Every structure is written in structure tokens, then in C-alpha cells.
């Protein structure tokens, strides 16, 4: 099986998300497809733009937003208040909190493939 650069980026973003959740005491969403879609979006932005810009927001100018760094994951609201607009990192006291800080790379790839079809 040929491992592409985008697969490497996807795995890197998965590993980042798992490590960051553990470091901040947050958990992934109770609906794993939400986690998979957000990680895929972060990886896509990293590949296309060179930075993991939050995939859950609309930007007039993505390049300007990257330079500003406010919405680069982990974004300022997450770093300052543990508030993740994407529901990637969820505090224990919030709705939709799951019980895991891990997700399978194969599952993320399945969700990515289902979105492409």
C-alpha cells in the first residue's frame, strides 16, 4: 500500500488531536464521525494551506487568517478557555462529550472516503 503525503498529514493531525485531548483533559465527541470530519478538515488545510486552520469556520481570506494565527488549531478560544467551536475537544461538563481521547486512523479514512462519494 502506498502511503501518500496526505495520509501522513492525516495521521499527524490524528496524533496531535489525541495528544492534545489528553494534555488538556478534554474528550472527543460522543459521535465519532464529528471527530473524524474535523481531523480530516485540519489535515486538508495543513496540506493545502500549510497550517491546520479551523475547518469549521468560513473565512474571506484563509491566508490572512493563517498569518493572524487566531484560528490555527488549537485556536485561541481553545487555548484560553477550552472552548472548541468544532467539538473536537470537549470538556467533561459539556453536551456531546464522549469517553475517549483516541480515534482510529482507519475510521477517519472511512469517513473521508464516504464524504468523497
Image (tube, helix red, strand yellow):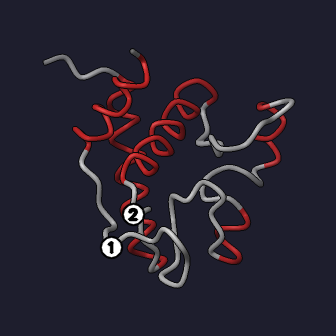
Total number of numbered discs in the rendering: 2
Q: Residue 108: which disc? A: none
- Residue 84 percent across, percent down from the top left: 62, 63
Q: Are marks 2 and 1 in contact (CB under 8 Å)?
A: yes
Q: Residue visible at 65% across and 46% down?
A: 54
Q: Residue visible at 55% across and 77% down?
A: 94
Assign the C terminus to one quadrant of the image. Answer: top left
In the depicted structure, whether residue 66 falls above or below residue 61: below
Which residue is nearer to you in this view: 32 or 55? 32
In the depicted structure, whether residue 71 falls above or below residue 67: below
Q: Residue visible at 60% across and 59% down?
A: 74
- Residue 33 percent across, percent down from the top left: 39, 46
Which residue is nearer to you in this view: 94 or 67? 94
**Label 2 neighbourhood size at 10 Å, few (<14), some (14-19), many (20+)?**
some
Side of 97 relative to 68 (left or right): left
Give whichever of discs 2 and 1 has the lower sequence position: 2
Q: Name, please, the residue furthest toward the bottom.
A: 93
Give the SS element for disc 1. Answer: loop
Q: Quadrant of residue 103?
A: bottom left
Side of 105 relative to 71 (left or right): left
Which residue in the structure is indicated by mark 1? 99
- Residue 83 percent across, percent down from the top left: 66, 70
Give the SS element for disc 2. Answer: loop
Rounded to the nearest whole Å, what is the CA distance between mark 2 and mark 1?
Answer: 7 Å
Side of 35 relative to 100 (left or right): right
Assign the N terminus to one quadrant of the image. Answer: top left
Q: Residue 30: which disc? A: 2
- Residue 110 percent across, percent down from the top left: 28, 31
Q: Residue visible at 40% across and 35% down?
A: 9
Q: Quadrant of residue 19?
A: bottom left
Amino acid at each position: 500500500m502506498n502511503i501518500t503525503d496526505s495520509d501522513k498529514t492525516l495521521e499527524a493531525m490524528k496524533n496531535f488531536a489525541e495528544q492534545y485531548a489528553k494534555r488538556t483533559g478534554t474528550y472527543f465527541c460522543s459521535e465519532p464521525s464529528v471527530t473524524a470530519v474535523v481531523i480530516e478538515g485540519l489535515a486538508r488545510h495543513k496540506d493545502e494551506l500549510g497550517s491546520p486552520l479551523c475547518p469549521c469556520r468560513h473565512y474571506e481570506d484563509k491566508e490572512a487568517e493563517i498569518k493572524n494565527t487566531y484560528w490555527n488549531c488549537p485556536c485561541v478560544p481553545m487555548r484560553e478557555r477550552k472552548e472548541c467551536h468544532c467539538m473536537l475537544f470537549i470538556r467533561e461538563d459539556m453536551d456531546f462529550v464522549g469517553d475517549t481521547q483516541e480515534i482510529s486512523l482507519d475510521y477517519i479514512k472511512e469517513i473521508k472516503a464516504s464524504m468523497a462519494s
